[in-house]
């Protein structure tokens, strides 16, 4: 499979509790209006039924916009709405099991926090890995201490599958993660917690793409 993650520079996630009172659906619409090409539905506080209803809408919206749609953790919801894939963590279902459940042609991402986990993810057949948390974050409740820029540099030097940096990434440190080898950057609060989501995405994009000229 030609891996579509290679073409993604900005990886957007939902989190309604950080969205200043806006719904996940409204937030995703703003992301798509700004030209985002990948959205992960991440929602830790809703029942399956509510998640399904939101994901049905987001599936339609992302399809219309030509954007990829991944679901965090919930394989059943992903299957029900024909999402493009699933992102799992270290304590979720193993990648080969998710692959078997989803069937061929779907994208599977796995969060990793160390070179050992990264190697195991490649071995297990993940299509991309999450690399984090790069900096301290309070957005993910059970996350480990920051693994920092060293782990990012290790991944950039040693792996060929796509990877997404995450955890505490803000406008002011995008230049740093890009300099250390990040191609794709994931942010939650820096995007969903902003009053003007579409405007903020344009600002972040400019920041990402001007980074190379600054060095
Ligand atoms: N995963 P923010 S850190 C969802 O390290 C998530 O795997 C992480 O939120 C990991 O951009 C994280 O607000 C939270 O810091 C990212």
Image (spheres, rainbow, N blue to C red):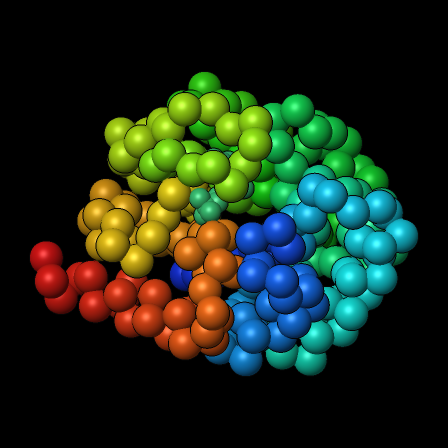
Viewer-proximal residue among 7 and 170: 170
> Which residue corresponds to the image point at 77% horizontal and 61% vertical from the top-left?
55
Viewer-proximal residue among 81 and 57: 57
> Which residue corresponds to the image point at 50% horizontal and 52% vertical from the top-left?
188
Relative to 15, residue 205 above or below: below
Which quadrant would the N terminus be assigned to in this image?
bottom right
Relative to 41, residue 76 above or below: above
Q: Residue lying furthest front in this view?
A: 21
> Which residue corresponds to the image point at 27% horizontal and 34% vertical from the top-left?
149
Which quadrant would the C terminus be assigned to in this image?
bottom left
Q: Quadrant of residue 190?
A: bottom left
Q: Position of residue 160 (x, y in %)?
A: 40, 41
Task: Judge whether residue 182 can be spotted in this image.
Answer: yes
Q: Position of residue 121 (x, y in %)?
A: 55, 30
Task: Judge whether residue 99 can be spotted in this image.
Answer: no
Relative to 148, residue 52 above or below: below
Viewer-proximal residue among 190 and 209: 190
> Which residue corresponds to the image point at 62% horizontal and 51% vertical from the top-left?
17
Q: Residue lying furthest left in this view?
A: 215
Viewer-proximal residue among 104 and 215: 215
Q: Position of residue 43 (x, y in %)?
A: 69, 48
Q: Residue lying furthest top in this view?
A: 116
Describe residue 211's horizontal placement relative to residue 205 as left or right: left
Q: Position of residue 134 (x, y in %)?
A: 36, 36
């Amino acid at each position: 499979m030609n891996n579509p993650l290679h073409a993604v520079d900005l990886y957007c996630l939902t989190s309604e509790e950080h969205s200043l009172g806006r719904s996940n659906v409204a937030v995703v619409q703003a992301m798509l209006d700004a030209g985002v090409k990948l959205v992960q539905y991440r929602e830790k506080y809703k029942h399956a039924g509510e998640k399904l209803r939101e994901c049905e809408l987001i599936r339609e919206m992302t399809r219309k916009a030509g954007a990829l749609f991944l679901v965090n953790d919930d394989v059943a919801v992903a299957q029900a709405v024909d999402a493009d894939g699933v992102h799992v963590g270290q304590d979720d279902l193993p990648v080969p099991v998710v692959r078997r459940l989803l069937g061929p042609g779907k994208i599977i991402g796995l969060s990793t926090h160390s070179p050992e986990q990264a190697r195991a993810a490649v071995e297990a057949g993940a299509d991309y890995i999450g690399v984090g948390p790069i900096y301290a974050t309070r957005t993910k409740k059970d996350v480990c201490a920051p693994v920092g820029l060293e782990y990012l540099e290790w991944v950039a030097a040693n792996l060929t599958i796509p990877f997404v940096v995450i955890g505490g990434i803000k406008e002011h440190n995008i230049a740093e993660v890009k300099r250390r080898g990040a191609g794709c950057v994931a942010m939650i609060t820096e995007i969903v917690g902003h009053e003007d989501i579409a405007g903020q995405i344009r600002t972040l994009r400019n920041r990402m793409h001007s980074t190379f000229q600054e060095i």
